[in-house]
Amino acid sequence: MAEFRNSAARATVQRWHASAVVNSSEELLDAFTLANWMQVRSAQRGNRRSLDDRLVEEGTEAEKRGSEVA
């Protein structure tokens, strides 16, 4: 089994394999594709969170400027 950095992805693939859901090469490929996608999403989540924080800060600053003008 491929090495996964994301423990949730690894656990998902192991659970599928253990439960015999993965019984063909096509299903195995689907499992690895999902696990890789989970790894990418996990890595992006940190970046997205910081972007969301910046957007909230910019929105708050814009609201303050709007109330000062009014």
Image (tube, grey):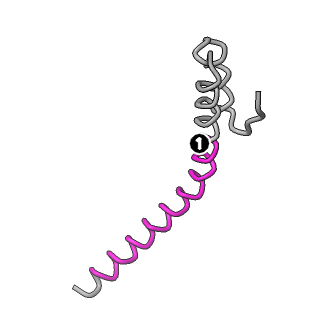
Judge whether residue 58 is colored magenta.
Answer: yes
Relative height, residue 28 to residue 44 (above, below): above
For badge 1, the amino acid type reads Trp
Residue plotted at (52% across, 63% down): 51
Q: Does dot 1 land on a helix, a strand or a loop?
A: helix
Label 1: few (<14), some (14–19) or many (≥20) C-alpha neighbours in 10 Å: few
| Residue at the far left in the pictured view | 70
Main SS of the magenta part reads helix
Residue 44, above or below 19: below
Q: Quadrant of the N terminus?
A: top right
Q: Residue at x 26, y 87 (%)?
A: 69
Residue under the image location 61 percent in, 29 percent down: 31
Give the percent coordinates (x, y) of residue 9: 64, 33
Q: Which residue is mark 1?
A: 37
Q: Residue furthest front?
A: 25
- Give, as a single range, the part of the protein colored magenta: 38-66
Q: Position of residue 6 (x, y in %)?
A: 68, 38
Taking the magenta stretch, the answer to whether it contains residue 22 is no
